Amino acid sequence: MSNARDPLLSVMFGDKGVRGWVLCLVIGLAGCGALPTRVDQPYSAALAPSADSPLARIARASTTEPGLSGFRLMPLGLHSLDARIELIRRARVSLDVQYYLIQNDRTGRLFMRSLRDAALRGVRVRLLVDDLNTVGADPMLSGLAAFPNVDVRLFNPFCCARQSVASRFTASLADIRRLNHRMHNKLFIADGAIAVMGGRNIADEYFARGVMSNFVDMDVLLVGPAVNQLAAIFDVYWNSPPAYPARVILGTPADDGEARIAFDHLVDDGDQMMSIVAPETDMFGRHRLADDLDTGRLTLAWGRAAAFADQPGKVMATSVEVAQSMTVQMNIMDRVALAKQQVVISSPYFVPGTEGVRVFADLRKRGVEVVILTNSLAANDVPVVHIGYARYRTQLVRAGVDLYELSPGALRRDAWDMFPGMSHGRLHAKTAVLDDSTVYIGSMNLDPRSENANTELGLVVQCPELATDVMRVINQARLQSAYRVQFAPDGESLVWLGMGERRDIVLSSEPEVSPVMRFQNMLLGPFVPEQLL
């Protein structure tokens, strides 16, 4: 799988990175490609919930008060995947789907197969995918686009040389600024009535189906006015200039029938056909979404919500200042700065910068508790990104921030019922809880890439019940499966304290990583620009 976070870091520092970077320089001397002309498409809008839609009827029947939106947190990967598949199977009018990554693995093929089946029932399917991680997925995307009722678009696409990330960047060196900006949004809307959004992409490791590693993640299912806000955001992205019809980039198949047959073979053959075996209940004691849907009423937490998203044109920004003016991160940090009692943040890639440290230090001076959970170096799937976080770690602890780093080893032992027994656990949930009542959940990390480069999608919810659920997930991670970072008795050096059953552990260096990795990050530290992290 391509690096799920930063395209340039993937090419420069990922597996086979040096070879790929040299290849870029050599081939780049031969010239650069250009995107084909994008013909303006007719404006396409979200379809209103229909009286003929069972999902729309269930959403209406579940509503307790006009003006409020209903929420169901989904921390368990298998339950979250099962919910998406159930919603696709029950959709009757429309599916609007927007993701940074849909991997060509058993989860991605199951998801795409389900979209095809919906289209064959007459459901209108609009699928918008960022083009960075589509290496090897072109036949799957073009095959789905060959079916009636389906429209597939690629966001901020590469022009050509599509066989690898390195070759794509190589063929477009003149366009490197644009291509280093990606659409990081994750959104799913069924029949204009029920939505799912949060941190998960569509791939095995986001739903506890990975063999080698899996992510601790969260997303939320919602109904009510917030769905209308998200649908409007989807329309803005769908109709924006960076969203190219897939056939403009991938070409039109010589025969749509053959493309559909090839797609059928890809998604119908293999272990993706196996049923999703989700645990009977999640950590809150809630059953599969299908059980609620079968009763005709959803059990939800209710509150008021506001959806935020960067402008799609952020990927075309010519300066950091222009990009920052289009970002949701400024909205979230403004709210964090106004907290009165407590701030709890989960961010897998956490690079607060000088301004972020100042905000957290000011909060502590006012007596506001600040708790931050992020990945340890061992848990980070992009170890070089840890460099940016480590630059501010001592300042955060000195300011009085309660800092925790996730332990992959503890996750493997604790399991949480989220992971296969031998998987490597990593944090991927992007959430915040303010004063036990306000929740942020979305795609945005608290780091320069989310602020300056990627487009992001977020939801701010006033709902104490949802806040309690999010806090329960974060607390289980930090108090059972993390290290607490504090000062050693000398008041200068840092130590890592084990939590939960590992309270007797006290370490004086980055835990669970080899000396080679520590040395590598130490060497790279002075040379990695923070704006790339």
Image (cartoon, grey):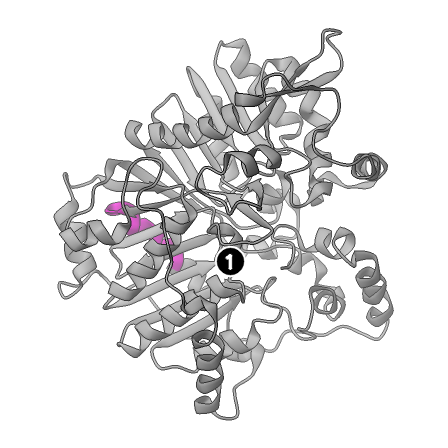
What is the quadrant of the N terminus in the image?
Answer: bottom right
Residue 313 image point, x, y percent: 53, 56
Q: Note whether residue 120 is visible.
A: yes
What is the quadrant of residue 347 in the picture?
A: top right
Label the magenta part by its dominant secondary structure.
Answer: helix
- Residue at 43% over, 20% down: 339
Residue 332 image point, x, y percent: 47, 33
Q: Is residue 232 above or below residue 473?
A: below
User: Is residue 358 toward the left or the right of residue 190 in the image?
Assistant: right
- Residue at 28% over, 65% down: 89
Residue 79 image point, x, y percent: 36, 49
- Residue at 25% over, 54% down: 290
- Tag 1's secondary structure? loop
Q: Note whether residue 246 is visible.
A: no
Disc 1: CA contacts within 10 A as few (<14), some (14-19) or many (>=20): many
Magenta-tinted stretch:
223-234
Q: Is residue 275 magenta?
A: no
Q: Nearer the viewer, residue 393 or 500?
A: 500
Q: Is residue 308 above or below residue 167?
A: above
Q: Is residue 268 above or below residue 53?
A: below
Q: Is residue 231 magenta?
A: yes
Q: Amino acid at mark 1?
A: Ala
Residue 124 image point, x, y percent: 31, 72
Q: Nearer the viewer, residue 71 or 479?
A: 479
Which residue is labeled 1 in the image? 203
User: Is residue 191 toward the left or the right of residue 364 in the image?
Assistant: left
What is the quadrant of residue 93 in the picture?
A: bottom left
